[in-house]
């Protein structure tokens, strides 16, 4: 009996050590596999300097962008080769550098909580002697007031792809029917140098910031996807989602990594968790970019003839030249002549009713910008929403059936907002194209490390128990 018990004990010890060796081998294999799949990170997790570029598959998204007429590869190529360089030069010119905005506004929906008190939230306003003298003068109306047609409340069922051939007739002071602010009221307006107030991380987070986007989506933006939604309602959602994605990417691309040393750089974790992990948000970013690009190309005749006068002849000639290069670029016209086809919308008996409904919803969204508790966030929110409202005005406020009674009239501020918005979307597309794969690989490594830690803990716990 004693001999048999000893044999059993020895056999149990052998089994125990075999299991320990097997578990240890499993851990080593897991570590080896994780080290192969985890990229080498030069900085803290999720943080890259602006000069870091990692090899990646740049064409994760392929095929035609939904509801558009161009594919992802073409958009990336055109943006990198043509659009982004031109837009970067344009927004630095005196004409497009200064934006007129009403910064101090009462929120029409709830009391302003003023949650943001950080230095990076504040806006540096222009002194009187800085912005162009011509901007201070009243607009020169090229047409008698009785010839200006107000589009608000008069939506049309059919939309044409052309604009009035007479194009530019002078900057106007007509109000944009798609936005909340009365752009004709100059009493509380101030000029801001956008180059001195970049859109970046400001520390504006938490309930106050979430409340803005919650209100945008829950109260004004149709839930999507839903079978009962029409094409026009889906487009409104996609425009807002694309703009939201772009803003999140701007924050992630210019992020305060270390407040103590004032170190700024890329936060790839933030970009992945807010945008990249949701493919539809990236798709909506591309859609919004093409939508705004279509508005710019549709208004080509108007924008080419517009007066970009700032009192600096050399800079003004440069601005005209850059605009012509943007509007009539042969590469763009050959590869993506019609970024978005607006003529298929507002069809049927519900067309006028739908346009009024969506116009009211977007106007409500623009009013929410007055509720943003961060001054710099409010500046860029107002600019980009006005830019999107200007794109909507260009594409949907001109009747295609009777050109003799419909003309496009734009304010100077609308054009400034439109081009700056297109530039911001262009920057977001470029950043996703260049750094998106690196952000995804970084987060794949994080997930692998988390799973590995769990596996090691389980295995070690089992060893200790035996």
Image (cartoon, rainbow, N blue to C red):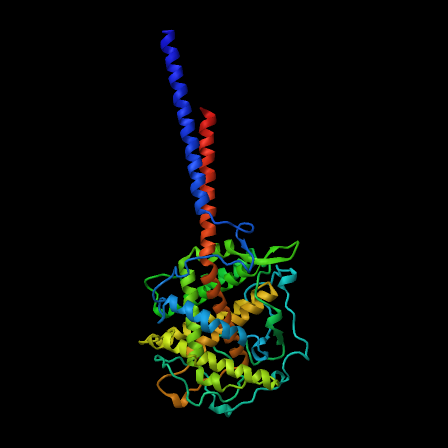
Q: Is residue 222 visible?
A: no
**Residue sitting at x 54%, y 65%:** 109
**Residue sitting at x 50%, y 72%:** 85
Q: Quadrant of the N terminus?
A: top left
Q: Is residue 82 visible?
A: yes
What is the residue that sits farthest to the top in this orientation? 1
The relative height of residue 138 versus residue 124 in the rendered view (above or below) is below
The count of marks equals 0
**Residue in front for this viewpoint, 445 or 388:** 445
| Residue 243 rendering spot, x and y as whole percentages | 47, 66
The relative height of residue 102 versus residue 35 in the rendered view (above or below) is below
**Residue in front for this viewpoint, 66 or 322:** 322
| Residue 226 rendering spot, x and y as whole percentages | 35, 61
The relative height of residue 258 versus residue 394 in the rendered view (above or below) is above
**Residue sitting at x 47%, y 91%:** 147
**Residue in front for this viewpoint, 365 or 79:** 79
What is the residue that sits farthest to the bottom in this orientation? 144
| Residue 80 rendering spot, x and y as whole percentages | 46, 69
Specify whether 430 is left or right of 7.
Answer: right
Q: Quadrant of the C terminus?
A: top left
What is the residue that sits farthest to the left in this orientation? 348
Specify whether 432 is left or right of 121.
Answer: left
**Residue sitting at x 55%, y 75%:** 91
| Residue 97 rendering spot, x and y as whole percentages | 58, 76
């Amino acid at each position: 009996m004693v001999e048999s018990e000893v044999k059993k004990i020895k056999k149990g010890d052998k089994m125990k050590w075999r299991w320990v060796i097997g578990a240890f081998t499993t851990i080593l294999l897991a570590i080896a596999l994780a080290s192969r799949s985890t990229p080498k990170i030069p900085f803290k997790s999720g943080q890259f300097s602006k000069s870091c570029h990692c090899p990646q598959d740049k064409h994760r998204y392929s095929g035609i962008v939904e509801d558009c007429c161009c594919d992802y590869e073409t958009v990336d190529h055109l943006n990198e080769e043509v659009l982004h360089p031109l837009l970067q030069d344009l927004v630095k010119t005196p004409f497009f550098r200064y934006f007129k905005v009403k910064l101090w506004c009462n929120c029409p929906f709830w009391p302003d909580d003023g949650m943001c008190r950080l230095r990076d939230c504040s806006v540096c306003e222009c002194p009187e002697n800085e912005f162009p003298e011509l901007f201070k003068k009243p607009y020169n109306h090229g047409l008698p007031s009785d010839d200006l047609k107000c589009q608000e409340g008069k939506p049309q069922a059919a939309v044409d792809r052309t604009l009035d051939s007479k194009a530019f007739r002078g900057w106007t002071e007509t109000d944009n029917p798609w936005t909340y602010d009365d752009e004709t009221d100059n009493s509380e307006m101030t000029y801001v140098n956008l180059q001195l107030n970049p859109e970046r991380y400001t520390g504006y987070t938490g309930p106050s910031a979430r409340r803005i986007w919650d209100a945008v989506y829950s109260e004004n933006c149709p839930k999507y996807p839903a079978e009962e939604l029409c094409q026009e309602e889906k487009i409104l959602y996609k425009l807002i989602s694309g703009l939201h994605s772009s803003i999140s990417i701007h924050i992630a691309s210019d992020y305060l990594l270390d407040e103590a040393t004032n170190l700024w750089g890329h936060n790839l974790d933030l970009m992945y968790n807010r945008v990249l992990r949701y493919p539809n948000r990236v798709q909506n970013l591309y859609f919004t970019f093409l939508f705004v690009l279509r508005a710019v190309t549709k208004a080509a005749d108007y924008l080419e003839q517009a007066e970009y006068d700032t009192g600096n002849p050399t800079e003004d000639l440069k601005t005209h030249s850059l605009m012509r290069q943007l509007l009539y670029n042969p590469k763009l016209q050959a590869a993506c002549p019609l970024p978005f086809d607006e003529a298929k919308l507002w069809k049927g008996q519900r067309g006028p009713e739908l346009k009024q409904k969506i116009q009211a919803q977007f106007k409500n969204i623009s009013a929410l910008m007055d509720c943003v508790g961060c001054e710099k966030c409010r500046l860029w929110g107002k600019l980009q929403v006005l830019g999107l409202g200007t794109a909507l005005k260009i594409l949907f406020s001109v009747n295609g059936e009777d050109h003799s009674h419909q003309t496009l009239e734009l304010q100077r501020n609308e054009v400034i907002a439109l081009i700056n918005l297109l530039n911001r979307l262009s920057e977001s597309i470029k950043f996703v194209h260049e750094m998106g794969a690196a952000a995804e690989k970084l987060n794949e490594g994080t997930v692998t490390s988390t799973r590995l830690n769990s596996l090691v803990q389980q295995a070690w716990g089992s060893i200790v128990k035996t």
